[in-house]
Amino acid sequence: MTDTAIEIREFLTVALRRPVEPDEDYFALGLADSLFALELVVFVEERFGIRIEVEDLELDNFRTAERIAALVAGKHGGPAAGDETGAGRAARG
Amino acid sequence: MPPAASGARPAGPDAPRPAGAPGLPAAVPDVPAAVPDVSVVDAAADLAAAVREDAGRWDERGALPDEAVRAVAAAGLLAPDLPARHGGAGATPVQLGEAVAHLGGVCGALRALLTVQGMTAAALLRWGSAAQRERWLPALASGERLAGFAATEREAGSALAEVGTRIEDDGEQLVVTGAKRWVTFGQSADLLLVLGRTAAGPTAVLVEGDRAGIGREPVAGQLGLRAARIAHLTFDRVRVPRENLVAPAGAGLTHTAAVALDHGRFTVAWGCVGMAEACLADAVEHAVRRVQGGVPLAEHQLVRSLLARSAVDAAAARALAERAAQARAGSPLGAVTETVAAKYAAAGAAKAVADRAVQVLGSAGCEPGGRPGRFYRDAKVMEIIEGSPQLAELHLADRLLRRAVRR
C-alpha cells in the first residue's frame, strides 16, 4: 500500500469510525452520506494539493482507499492544481 | 417601493455596520482579517432600509414584486461571492454573511432570493463544466437568470438520494420527468437545478425555465416565507440538451446537492442572525416606549429577562455565523461542520427571539404585517429548511465522536 493510500485509509477509518480496508468499498457498505462525500473531496484536495474535477466524480474513483490513491497519483503526474473555485488549496493550520 | 440605493456612500474607515440591533454591548472587536467590503455590505444595508416598510405588504400579498428582485440585482447582491471573472463581486464569506443579515433582518423572501441564487451558483462554480460556468454564472450574478433549486419530492425530503425524477437520454437529448415540491422562487425561476436519476444513477441537470413541459403550481398561505414565490413544479418530458447535465451519474447528486446545501445553510444562518437582531431591536423599542399602569414595560424585571435572553441568543448566533465565515474564508468547502453549527444555532435563536419579541409586543406583535409576527412564522420555516435541527445534531455529534476516536 502506498503512503497516499495509508493516509486516505486513516481518514476514512476516523471519519467512518470503523476500520476500512484499502480495497473495501465503503460506499457499498452504506457508510457514507452526502456531507461525508464533500468532506472527502476537500480532504483529498487539500492534503494532496490536487483539484478534483467534475469528470473525476465517477464513483469508481472514490470507491476504495486504493482507488482514491490511484486518482491522486494520476493527478500528480498531470497539470498543477488550484483556481478561483477554492479547490486544491493547502490545508489550514 | 423606493428605487434601490446607489450604494454611493462616502468612503471612510468605518467599521462594518452590524445588521441593525442593539445586541450585546460591543462584545467582539472587529477581526482585521475579516473586515467586510463596504460596497457589498452597505449596498445590502441601503436596500434593506429602503424596503423595510414594504416587506410586510409583500408577505400579505404573497409575492416579492419584480421591482424588488430587480433592485437586489442592481445592487449586485444576487451572487456577490462569485469571483469577478464570473460576474460576481468576489465577496468574502464575512461580507456575504453581513449582506445577507441586512436583508434577512427586513424580509425573509429577499434573503431566500439570495440563498437560492447562491446555492445554484456555488454548485455550478464547483461542479459545473467550464462551458456551464461561462454561460450561467454571469447570468446568475447579474440577475439575467433567476435560479430555482428543485430538490424536494413527496418521497424525498432530507433523504435527497431517493429522488424519483427521471433524467433519460432519448438518443439526442435529455428528457426530464418528475414532480418537485416547495421550490423557492419556483413560480418565476428561469434556471432550475433539478435533482434526478439517470439509468446510471442519481445526478443533477439544469432546466431552463422556458422549456416546454414545465408546470408551475404556486403555493399560497403556507406558514412562512410567503413572499418567496414558492411553487410545486412538474416536469412532463421536458427536453434539454445533454450539456445541461451537471455532474456524472452516481456521485453527481450527492456532490452537487452537498455544495448547494452547504452554501444555503450559510446564508440561512446569516439571515437568521439578521432576523434575531431585528426582533430584539423591535422588542427593546417596544419595551421602552409602551407604558402600562404608569410604567414602561422595560421597568418590569420579567420583561428585562426576556430581552436579556434574546440578546444572548442573538449574539451567540452571530458569533457562530462569524466563526463559520472565517472557516470558509480559509477553505470554502471545508467548513461544513462549522456551517451546520451556525445554521442550527442561528435558526434556533431566530425562533426564540421572535417568540419573545411577539410576547413583549403583545397584541401589537400579532398585528397583520408586523415584523416580529412575520418572523415568528418565518423562523420556524428557517429551522426546517437546508437541514432540520435533528439532522444537524446527528452531524455534529458524529464529528464529536470522530474526535474522541482520534485521541
Image (cartoon, grey):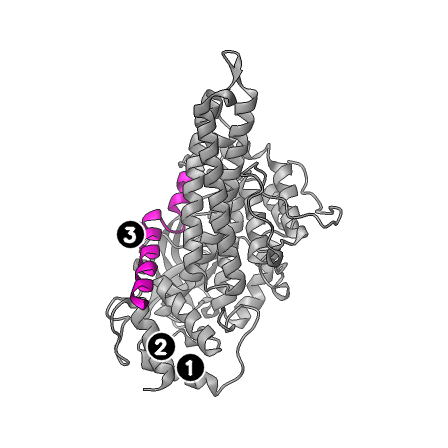
Above or below, B34 relative to B246: above
Q: Is residue B11 left or right of residue B200?
A: right
Residue placed furthest toward the top: B293
Tell me which residue sits at (45%, 75%) in the image.
A47
Q: Residues within 10 Å of mark 3 (few under 14, many from 20)?
A: few
In primary-sequence order, the first of circles 2 and 1 is: 2
Mark 2 and 1 residues: CB-CB less than 8 Å, in contact?
yes
Look at 53% across and 58% down and name the residue there: B326
Query: Residue B328: x, y in percent?
Result: 51, 60
Q: Position of residue A71 (x, y in %)?
A: 40, 82
- Please rate how many residues cluster around mark 1, counting C-alpha atoms within 10 Å: few if below 14, some from 14 to 19, many from 20: many
Q: Residues within 10 Å of mark 2 (few under 14, many from 20)?
A: many
Of tags 2 and 3, the one toward the viewer is 2
Q: Looking at the picture, which amino acid does disc 3 mark?
A: Glu
Name the disc covering residue B155, or none: 3
Camera-nearest residue between B71 and B135: B71
**Spatial distance from mark 2 to mark 1, Cα to Cα?**
10 Å
Chain containing the residue with disc 1: A
Specify the amino acid type for callout 2.
Ile
Disc 1 residue type (three-letter): Val
As helix, strand or loop, the secondary structure at mark 1 comes to: helix
Is residue B57 at least partly visible in the picture? yes
Does the magenta portion include B396? yes
* The residue stretch that appears in magenta: B379-407
Viewer-side residue, B217 vs B292: B292
Q: Which numbered marker is on residue A72?
A: 1
Left or right: B200, with B70 as reference point: left
Q: Residue at x 48, y 70 (%)?
A: B243
In which quadrant is the C terminus of chain B drawn? bottom left
Q: Which chain does the residue under circle 2 lie in?
A: A
The residue singled out by tag 2 in the image is A8
Nearer the observer: mark 3 or 1; the answer is 1
